[in-house]
Image (cartoon, grey):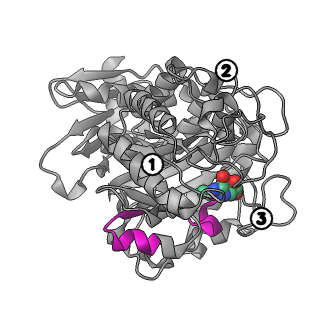
């Protein structure tokens, strides 16, 4: 029987397939087709080098995607020698410098699939590409009919920008840890590697700070339009950070200040210049709150918060906000931002802040997140800082698609799927070129977004285009070609149960 199946396996004529016809997003740097196919079967096994225990998660991650929909029992295991026919082999190599930090090489023959990278992140991104080479029903959580064919050839790929992110505002409306993890899974599928959590604002403080407990017990108790708010205990937050890290996503915590601080000002009277605690706020106005910038308690407060956040976040950044401080005079705002930056660097973290912080003297390694004023972004570049591109007119995912969109706002622009895709970060703002740009981040503000379904509708498919902007060379991108690849993702989005917006501008298959 074994001989028969071995003979059958080796001489079964393979279905010809064309790797160049696949609709991979983000578009890979280079694809070569060899016009045959690899057959994924119950005999397939996933191997990774004995020496690379840190590939075990990625191996199991792939097996956990393949098994539910194929009904196979594919295992991921370490091996000391080269794997046999029908295997998927994950292997790190330190002489693939052309792949840089996050690149990978995916080679598919009739008998073997190999993913090679310098680092585990590259292996993980090769897995995301391999996922997209299987039929969309591979994403199903119930057993589907095969066959499970993968076109043969090779892909050599690496990202344009090192920071490819999303921001989720969990203050206006709170999203529990399970929802954030689901969002992380969707981001990982498109090779995004950063999730910025907007943890505090006027309407809610969402992260437990043990030295200032009222911030969450009181300041986290409500949300926009009132009702129950919510917050992450430090244990829940650490769980989110771990879940993200396993998927090569860093978490960036934001404590917005000196403005957007009503939740803190309602929690502790002493944070207010007049010594009176503010009322909790459930509206959606902005720019009416400020910490007391000339009171020492304020800086003790910030030091305590940043110290606890630094311990909770292994990632390199702490985001200090700095936006829309309309009631903080500039002569107070600048020294405040200067002092807060020093607190962040004291705890060995790098500063991130909205573009207004460019009015202050930026710490070395500070990054300015451009959202609204190009002149602030150029001020940042003049100070030698990097810019994280989040132009509201292109990347704000709470912007309505058009005037009929049920959720969101349109103060910056209506942003249809084509407008979200057809721009180049390196030529959007005069004076800001590729070398000045850390990367791209799409921001979902949640004044009007209350749950995961609404989040998915606003985020998808625009963030898929942003993921391509962060990963793929601008010279390799154009809307007319991209929209066909995007249209071919509809079955995949459905199998992943993503509630995406079916834009009329996209030829959905
Ligand atoms: N701008 C505010 C956000 C949010 C947003 C809604 C920034 C940096 C408008 N600040 O964007 O708090 O209210 O679109």
In what element is the residue under mark 2?
helix
Instruction: Pick whichever of labels 2 and 1 is earlier in the sequence.
Output: 1
CA gap, disc 2 and disc 1? 36 Å
> In this rendering, which labeled residue sits more in front, label 3 or label 1?
3
Q: Residues within 10 Å of mark 1 (few under 14, many from 20)?
A: many
What's the residue at 33%, 57% (across, down)? 157
Q: Which residue is drawn at 47% across and 51% down?
A: 336
Query: Residue pushed farthest bottom?
Result: 430
State the CA–CA distance, disc 3 to disc 1.
Answer: 28 Å
Q: What numbered label is drawn on residue 410?
A: 3
SS for dot 1: loop
Kindly identify the residue that appears in the image at 35 percent across and 74 percent down.
Answer: 382
Residue extending farthest left: 95
Whether residue 481 is visible to the viewer of this picture, yes or no, is yes
Does ligand 1 reach within 8 Å of label 2's beta carbon? Answer: no
Magenta span: 377-397
Q: Name the residue under label 2.
A: 217
For the C terminus, which image quadrant?
Answer: bottom right
- Pick the residue in front: 491 or 404: 404
Compared across the picture, whether 106 is left or right of 186 comes to left
């Amino acid at each position: 029987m074994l001989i028969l199946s071995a003979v059958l396996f080796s001489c079964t004529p393979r279905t010809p397939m064309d790797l160049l016809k696949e609709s991979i997003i983000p578009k890979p740097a280079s694809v070569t087709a060899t016009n045959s196919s690899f057959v994924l079967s119950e005999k397939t096994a996933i191997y990774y080098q004995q020496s690379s225990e840190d590939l075990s998660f990625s191996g199991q991650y792939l097996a956990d995607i393949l098994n539910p929909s194929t009904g196979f029992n594919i295992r991921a295991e370490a091996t000391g020698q080269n794997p046999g026919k029908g295997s998927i082999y994950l292997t790190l190599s330190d002489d693939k410098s052309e792949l840089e930090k996050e690149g990978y090489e995916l080679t598919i023959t009739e008998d073997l699939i190999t993913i090679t990278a310098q680092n585990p992140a590259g292996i993980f991104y090769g897995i995301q590409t391999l996922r997209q080479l299987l039929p969309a029903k591979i994403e199903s959580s119930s057993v589907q009919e095969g066959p499970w064919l993968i076109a043969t050839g090779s892909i050599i790929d690496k990202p344009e920008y090192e920071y490819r992110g999303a921001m989720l505002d969990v203050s206006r409306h709170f999203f529990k840890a399970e929802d954030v993890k689901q969002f992380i899974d969707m981001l990982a599928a498109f090779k995004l590697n950063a999730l910025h959590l907007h943890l505090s604002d006027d309407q809610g403080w969402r992260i437990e700070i043990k030295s200032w407990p009222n911030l969450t017990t009181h300041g986290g108790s409500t949300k926009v339009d009132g009702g129950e708010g919510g917050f992450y205990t430090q244990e829940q937050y650490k769980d989110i950070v771990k879940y993200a890290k396993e998927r090569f996503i860093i978490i960036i915590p934001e404590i917005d200040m000196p403005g957007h601080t009503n939740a803190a000002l309602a929690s502790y009277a002493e944070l207010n210049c007049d010594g009176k605690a503010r009322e909790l706020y459930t509206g959606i106005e902005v720019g009416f709150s400020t910490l007391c910038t000339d009171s020492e308690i304020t800086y003790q407060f910030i030091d305590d918060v940043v110290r606890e956040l630094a311990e909770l976040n292994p990632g390199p950044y702490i985001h200090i906000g700095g936006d829309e401080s309309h009631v903080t005079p500039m002569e107070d705002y600048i020294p405040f931002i200067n002092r807060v930056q020093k607190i962040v660097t004291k705890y060995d973290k790098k500063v991130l802040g909205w573009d207004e912080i460019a009015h202050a003297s930026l710490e070395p390694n500070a990054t300015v997140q451009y959202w609204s004023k190009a002149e602030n972004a150029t001020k940042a570049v003049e100070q030698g800082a990097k810019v994280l591109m989040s132009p509201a007119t292109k990347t704000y995912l709470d912007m309505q698609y058009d005037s009929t969109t049920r959720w969101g706002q349109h103060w910056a622009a209506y942003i249809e799927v084509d407008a979200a895709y057809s721009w180049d970060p390196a030529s959007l703002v005069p004076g800001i070129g590729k070398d000045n740009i850390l990367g791209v981040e799409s921001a979902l503000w949640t004044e009007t977004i209350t749950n995961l379904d609404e989040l998915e509708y606003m985020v998808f498919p625009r963030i898929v285009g942003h993921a391509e902007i962060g990963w793929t060379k601008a010279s390799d991108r154009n809307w007319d070609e991209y929209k066909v690849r995007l249209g071919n993702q509809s079955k995949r989005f459905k199998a992943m149960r993503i509630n995406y917006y079916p834009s009329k501008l996209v030829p959905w298959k």
